[in-house]
Amino acid sequence: MDIRSTIEKMHALGIEGTAKMAAVKWKKMEHGIGMISAPARQSILEKILSRDYKRVIIFENHFGYHNIMMQRPQHLLRNCGDDETLVLYNSYYDIDFENRGRITQIDRFVFVLDLYYFRRCLMKMVRKIPYRYLCVYSTDTVPVRRINEYLESGFRVIYEYVDDINPDLISRRRIGEIMDRHRYLLGDSRVLAVTSADKLYENVRTAGPKSGSILISNGAECGKFIPEAVTDDTEYLDWIREDRIKVGYYGALASWVDYELLKKLSDEERIQIILIGVEHDDSLKKSGLLERKNVRYFGRKPYDVLAGYVHYFDVCMIPFVLNEITESTSPVKLFEYMAMEKPVVSTALPECMKYDPVVTAHSQKEFVEAVYDCWNEREDQKRKEQLSRCAWENDWSAKAGQLKQYLSQWEKNER
């Protein structure tokens, strides 16, 4: 970054933001025990790139790999890696690295690495790979300046437009910048807009973009959500009761959760409500829901053990309010619930109404009734088979296959 750009960035960040930026830069200085040298990093990349890959996908982002809940980027990109496709996933977070080498192999052809250290060398070394892609996420803050560095180096862009660009998801200070970037990307023919919901796909088409566009909904790692999985969490097991209907939800606890609906559900004494996940904001605390004796929030649980908790749900739910965010949402948990062969009750979200095994409700009364109906049919073998089949049709491997098929066609058309 040149001096003028640095000054402009400092002005935009303000005193506090500039201080934080300086602290990060200092932390990343190449000194201290265990920090590998630039030549060592080049040697690591040479080894990774020794295979004759057809394409490379580099995911620039600011949220890391294990730093947040396992969501679409981790699943989709990990499943894209194969003997033709190298995936390099950026992270700036210590949690993603075992040592100060700042690179971790996630799968045979998938690596998480800190691009702060590797980017300069990497950009030169990947030139030998015929097809090069930068992947960016619609609600992340990778700037146009960085995207242009890739475009100027012969990359194309996979633009993951998977959430409504909304102030409830993005800092109000950054939303203007994100919207400008959104319009910029849709105006470039070197960009492929990958949408996850019908509404987002229509948004792109309506914009009359120069970019390409494709719809790939979310999915599940079905192999990690098997019905036989169980947890040994004694606090959890001691609270749930065999003589109650256990209705569960995991995911973000945020303003788009319909807490009034959950209060209505908790009025039913036969029901226990189980909540697991991350408090995205203070909406759960403010809701008063946790004051109900038959409601329990168990906090965030590691992705690899979630299935063990879901095992004890009688009914799984997606209790979202209908708004701009949720009408554009393809819930990952929907497919994971189905992989567990659990009945699913959702509010009338467009992306949930697509799937026959899912029961959707248009009112609080309908939702409560649907929970009881699903509980009564929870052991129906035909329904379980239907749920499992739908989940496997939407396994992340299938979603990655869709994306790579489109990329292959794009590459073929350019020959």
Image: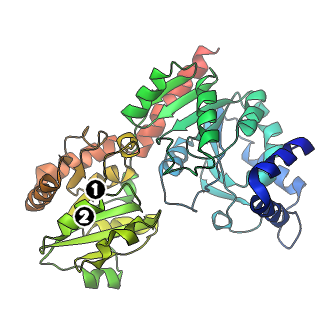
Q: What residue is drawn where x is 63% and y is 34%? A: 180
- If the image is split into quadrants, where does the C terminus sit? top right
Q: What residue is drawn where x is 59% and y is 33%? A: 182
Give x and y (percent) for residue 59.
64, 44
SS assignment at label 2: helix
Single out the residue that lies furthest toward the right: 3
User: In which quadrant of the rendered view does residue 262 lie?
Assistant: bottom left
SS assignment at label 1: loop
Give x and y (percent) for residue 208.
51, 18
- Residue bearing mark 2: 262
Amino acid type at circle 1 is Pro
Distance of mark 1 from mark 2, alpha carbons?
A: 7 Å
Label 1 or label 2, whichever comes before in sequence order: 2
Amino acid type at circle 2 is Leu
Q: Nearer the viewer, residue 162 or 76?
A: 162
| Mark 2 nearby-residue class (10 Å; few <14, some 14–19, many ≥20) | some
Give x and y (percent) for residue 246.
20, 70
User: In which quadrant of the rendered view does residue 273 lie?
Assistant: bottom left
- Residue bearing mark 1: 319
Q: Nearer the viewer, residue 397 or 10?
A: 10
